[in-house]
Image (tube, rainbow, N blue to C red):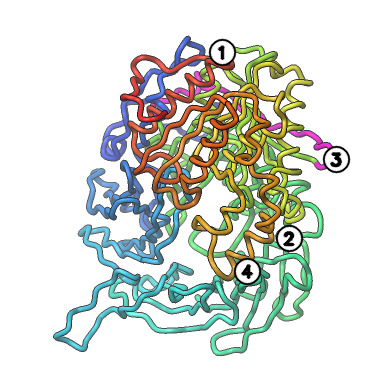
Amino acid sequence: MRWVPGLILIGKRGANVKGIATLLACAAALAATPGTAAVNVEAYVKKDGFEDIKLSPTGEYYAATVPREDRTILVVIRRSDNKPSGVVAGERNSVIADFDWVSPDRVIVSLAEKFGNLARPQLTGELYGVDAATGSGEMLVGQRLQGAGLGTKIQPKKVERVAAFLTDDLPQDGKNVIIAVMPFSGDPFTRAEKMDAYSGRRHPVARAPVRNADFTTDNAGVVRFASGFGADNIRKLYYRQGDGAEWELISDEAVTHRHESPIGFSADNRTAYLQAEQETGPDAIITLDLATRSRKELLRDDDSDPYRIIYRNGTRVPVGAFFMDGKPRTGFFDEKSSEAVLYRSLQAAFGGDSVRITSQTSDGRLALVQVSSDRNPGDFYVFDVQAKKASHLLSRSSWFDPEKTAATEPLQLKARDGLTLHGYLTLPKGSGGKNLPMVVMPHGGPFGVQDTWGFDPDAQMLAEAGYAVLRLNYRGSAGYGAAFMHAGAREWGLKMQDDLTDATRWATTQGIADASRICIYGGSYGGYASLMGVAKEPSLYKCAVGYVGVYDLPTMHTEGDIQRRGSGETYIREWIGDREALGATSPNRMADRIKVPVFLAAGGEDERAPIKHSEMMEKALRNAGVPVETLYYKTEGHGFYLEEHRREYYTRLLSFLARHLGGAVATAASGAPAARGK
């Protein structure tokens, strides 16, 4: 790490920083030395002290989310003495999907449920208000909101079974917010409402002309865009000139075959900024002149979509974007802007690491800066912009020493049909990077999900055990344009699988992987791809691991939380395939082609990939005489939550891989409880 002249650093990762780090239960450093004969999985099992943290508009408070065994909680902390002023905790499987400071002393929390560690949070549509000074909180809108009782007709909050989501925190208002509200029904119409962030009182301000709509406001808080889709999953974008004006359809995917999504307005509200899909290549950020309706490309990478939008401090005015261009980089509309200058200064100070301003005080003086990399889970600094002083606040997974973790490098290769593929290779620290046992690790999703450069705990654990780890953004993944994602439609077990095969063979031809010591391991869709890999390429892999996977594709039409009438039904048909054709690419129906040992793990409460899939896969393998190990937990969902379950899973995983590839096992100190698997 190098420092630019004039920048002062106070504290660093690994320092004995008291106060907020202790308060959030950041653990003491835990030895985890790569390259030893065994892996202490405790470092990869234990939960972090916090997930996200944001600075209040005046800098008086922090708000942070803290993980527990099967839920997350929100803690509000005074900066003056690092003492908590409030805590919000939900029920089992409840998580805080997001939270926002809507005034100097008020936080709005968006609640969700998450049935399993890998599951995407399912928003419950409940918004909860927290007073920073007193710590008191109350439900403002949502399905579990209770009225004032039968004895009064005066109801301070409207009690109805709806889902609500924060659209605009109205930073110049200080009291009200704009929310999107929709009834609990299939493919509903959405309405925009202004809500008092303290009392929960609300009144309508707009109704969407399309189902499943999201709203976008201008800098005055006026709803101007509505973007949504119906049962046909065709996305439409509507615009209106202001309050009370008629909606106008300005982008129809059925006509253009591309979607445009609003990301904000210029300061004078005369220009809108859109992220626009292109016929080929990555998305672009374009300007839309609202008077002439002319469009102009403003910012575009050669192969990567905008990954995260950068906004001017205290506003909703976009000024640039992050691109996951192998490693993350920034691009600005005006490279001479104050935001661009500030980012360049910080990036120079933390050379080689990714730098992101996560929140900032309204006056722009203090910024909360996250610094992370492939070897560093993330350090947070409070940066005084005027004094150019960065004070270390706390670290994610503080027990990891970046000097001892494995490096991850971007890779690029050609698929057999000429399509360019991107991915990442993590190599054991101290290895020569040649002739290594390798684990191919396909990500879940599969559509709209992307492996990125950064600290990946599973890849780090496997690298510590001595394996090269290959992660590939096969066709269908997010991040490389609409055409690349659509290239994966209805290609489960076909071209998407061929991409993984091609990447595996690329690693052997490059001399990175020992062709006789390769295993494939993934979760969710990655579990499917792992079992399909050994069915389709019986001699390429030595073993396979399927974690909370789906293995019988026709069953996806009838069971699981993706399947629902309307848009969900359309999604399965258009992106996965027709039920009658999917048996041919279902690994449980191809078990006789599998010639290598298999390890399956699943949860009995999994709603995304019901355990029935793993049970059918296990039965088919046993009937075919294939060696199979299983680990099932009735009380777990889509990914294991409880530490003792995760500990046993990782211990079993390392043992399974070691028997077939020769890497390290878990240390005795990792001690798994008595096996519950078969």
> For the view shown, which residue lies furthest in the right direction?
418
Earlier in the chain: of badge 4 and badge 2, it is 4
Please tell me whether mark 1 sits on a helix, a strand or a loop. Answer: loop
On residue 427, the disc is none
The residue carrying mark 4 is 266
> Quick one: SS at disc 3?
loop
The Cα atoms of the two marked residues, 3 and 2, are separated by 22 Å
Dot 4 and dot 1 residues touching (CB under 8 Å):
no
Is the residue 249 above or below the residue 618 in the image? below
Q: Amino acid at mark 2?
A: Glu
Gap in Å between the C-alphas at discs 1 and 3? Answer: 34 Å
Q: Residue at 78% x, 33% y: name it.
A: 413
The alpha-carbon separation of the residues under discs 4 and 2 comes to 21 Å
- The residue type indicated by label 4 comes to Ser
Q: Kindly indicate whether the residue at mark 3 contacts the one at mark 1 (C-beta within 8 angstroms).
A: no
Q: Which residues are magenta?
A: 398-419
Q: Position of residue 264 (x, y in %)?
A: 60, 67
Q: Name the element at disc 2.
A: loop
Q: Say whether residue 268 is visible.
A: no
Amino acid carrying label 3: it is Gly
Classified by dominant secondary structure, the portion drawn in magenta counts as loop
The residue at which mark 1 appears reads as 662
